[in-house]
Amino acid sequence: MSSSAQKYDVFQAIADPTRREVLKLLAHKELPISEITSHFPMSRTAIAKHLHILSEANLVSGQKVGREKRYHLQPETFQELRDWLSYYDQFWNNKLSMLKYVVEDEEDCRSNIETD
């Protein structure tokens, strides 16, 4: 499969810090590529490639308005990320609760030893 035919998933798309920054910009309002490019020290072509990957992952979409294409977020696609992250939120909450229990239990044991 050639790289031009590759379909990117959400996780591949957000792996790059530039693409995450593009998503932050688009979270505020829809923007044309020229305005997005002005926020980065790279060429319009490089930003277009990042936007293509984000589009392939359905995180952004572009709509022709007059002579320019304006990009905006596709918020429903972020549900996949939210679902994946919620599992790990629960995982870490459980681990932290267990750590708290161990630490508090150890403190109780120390205080009992000191009073003896």
Image (cartoon, rainbow, N blue to C red):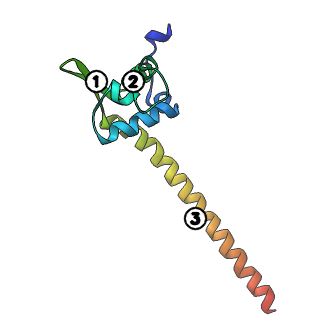
Tell me where residue 65 appears, x and y as whole percent. 19, 22
Question: Image quarter for residue 57?
Answer: top left
Q: Amino acid at mark 3?
A: Ser
The numbered dot on residue 92 is none
Crowd rating for badge 2 (residues with CA inside 10 Å; few <14, some 14–19, many 20+): many
Residue 62 tag number: 1
CB atoms of marks 2 and 1 within 8 Å: yes
Q: Residues within 10 Å of mark 1 (few under 14, many from 20)?
A: some
| Residue 79 point in image, percent of width and height | 36, 40
Vertical placement of 89 versus 78: above or below?
Answer: below
Q: Which residue is mark 2?
A: 51
Q: CA distance from mark 2 to mark 1?
A: 9 Å
Q: Is residue 67 left or right of residue 18?
A: left
Q: Residue at x 76, y 81 (%)?
A: 110
Q: In the orientation shown, which residue stands out farthest toward the top? A: 2
In front of the other: label 1 or label 3?
Answer: 1
